[in-house]
Amino acid sequence: MYLSKAILFVSLAASTIASPSRKRADLLQVQDYAQFQISDGVAGNALEEVAAKFPVDEFRANLAGVSANDLAILKAARETAEAAEADEGGFNDAIDQVGENSDDGIALQTGKIKNKVLKLELQVLALQIELAQGNGDQAKIDEEQTKLDKNVATDQEGAGDQSQSINFAGTSQP
């Protein structure tokens, strides 16, 4: 009897340790764009700035275990970052208003690149999560990763350049 209880305990402990795909508690909360944007400051570390705002490494350590709520927030944040680039009142409008070759325009262009890194890192991460959870497309991940790599390189080339954000209304609300 004692031996069978010990075997059962060891079996349960081993299965608990060996199951890395368990869903974990939500790590993200809904935020305003102003709270998760990374366009202020200087160029050069956009990817690290994304990781400071979102638990990228923690998610990548267990892609299959990311909660549905966290995935929805990541997707909503990506959509808001994309809207901040192209929608009315976004980076494109702000750059047009001040002139792309002015000092402010150049700082806004730098901020736009950092925003693209944010958008694309969240896109790649969401696609990787979906793939790990059985609903993904590796070709789409590869396509978005290529875009991300290009924008990260552009950000790093401008390391130290002044970067400017925009005042954009949006949230990570799914």
Image (cartoon, helix red, strand yellow):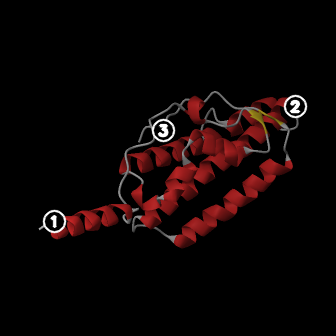
Which residue is drawn at the image coordinates 37% and 62% (left, top)? 17
Residue 156 vertical position relative to residue 41 in the rendered view, above or below: below
Indicate the quadrant containing the N terminus: top left, top right, bottom left or bottom right: bottom left
Q: Amino acid at mark 3?
A: Ser
Separation of disc 3 and disc 1 at Cα?
53 Å
Residue hosting label 3:
172
Front residue of 21 and 19: 19
Which residue is drawn at the image coordinates 48% and 38% (left, top)? 172
Residue hosting label 2:
103
Q: Amino acid at mark 2?
A: Asp
Residue 60 vertical position relative to residue 10 in the rendered view, above or below: above
Residue 137 vertical position relative to residue 97 in the rendered view, above or below: below
Front residue of 132 and 154: 132
Residue hosting label 1:
2
- The image quadrant that residue 163 belongs to is top right
Indicate the quadrant containing the C terminus: top left, top right, bottom left or bottom right: top left
**Secondary structure found at label 1:** helix
In the rendered structure, the answer to whether residue 168 lies left or right of residue 134 reads right
